[in-house]
Amino acid sequence: MKRLGVEAVITADKEVLMSADKVIFPGVGEAETTMNHLRATGLDELIKNLRQPVLGICLGMQLMCRYSEEGDTNCLNIFDTEVKRFVPARHEDKVPHMGWNTIGEVNSRLFNGFTEEEFVYFVHSFYVPVNECTAAQTHYILPFSAALHKDNFYATQFHPEKSGTVGERILKNFLDI
C-alpha cells in the first residue's frame, strides 16, 4: 500500500474497521483456526455487515465463501459457494499450486486496464469452483475462480501484493472503487 501512496492500518479493532474507507481481508493460514478466531472476536458478523468496499486475498477470499473443505469449516457465506481441496489429476500436478498464471474471462472493476496475457501469482492448496460470483478464472488441474465479486465484496485467490506491477494496478483499481 505504501508503494501506492496509501497509509494502511493493520487492525482487528471493530470501530476502526467500520469507519475505514476500504477494508482488505488478507489471508495466510488455515480456514478452521481463522474462522474460530473471527467468531470468538465477533469479527465474523462485522465483516459480513461491512458496507464499504472489501477485498479478500487468498485465504481471505476462501473465508468469504459458505464452506471450506479445509477443516470441514463453515465460513462467512458472503459468496454462496464452497472451497475445495485440489486433487492432483496427473503425477506432474503439484499441490499446493504455486506460481504465475494468466487469468481470463474477467468481469470486475478490479481488472480495469488488465489484459489476459498478464500474469498473477498464486500459492494455495484449495480452490473455489467457477460460480455465479466468479469475476475472473484461471486453470490449474481444472478451471477455478481467480477472483470473486458480489455487491461491495471483491476477492482474489491470487496475491496482488506479490504480482508486481500487474498486482499494483489491481490494488489501485480496488482503491479507486
Image (tube, rainbow, N blue to C red):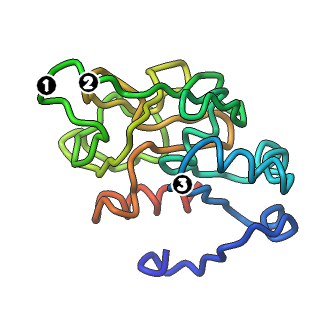
Label 1 element class: loop
- First in residue order: circle 3 vs circle 1: 3
Position in image of residue 120 (x %, y %): 28, 50
Q: Mark 3 — residue?
A: 27
Closer-to-camera residue (5/80): 80
- Amino acid under label 3? Gly
Position in image of residue 84 (x %, y %): 47, 25
- Amino acid under label 1? His
User: Label 3: how many residues lie within 10 Å, few (<14), some (14-19) or many (20+)?
Assistant: some
Tell me the mark number nearer the camera, choosing from 3 and 2. 2
- Label drawn at residue 91: 1
Q: Quadrant of residue 177?
A: bottom right
Distance Cα–Cα, label 2 vs label 1 = 7 Å
- Label drawn at residue 88: 2
Label 3 element class: loop
Label 2 element class: loop
- Amino acid under label 2? Pro
Left or right of 149 in this view: 151: right
Distance Cα–Cα, label 3 vs label 2 = 23 Å
Which residue occupies 44% across, 21% down? 130
Position in image of residue 162 (x %, y %): 34, 62
Above or below, 38 relative to 136: below
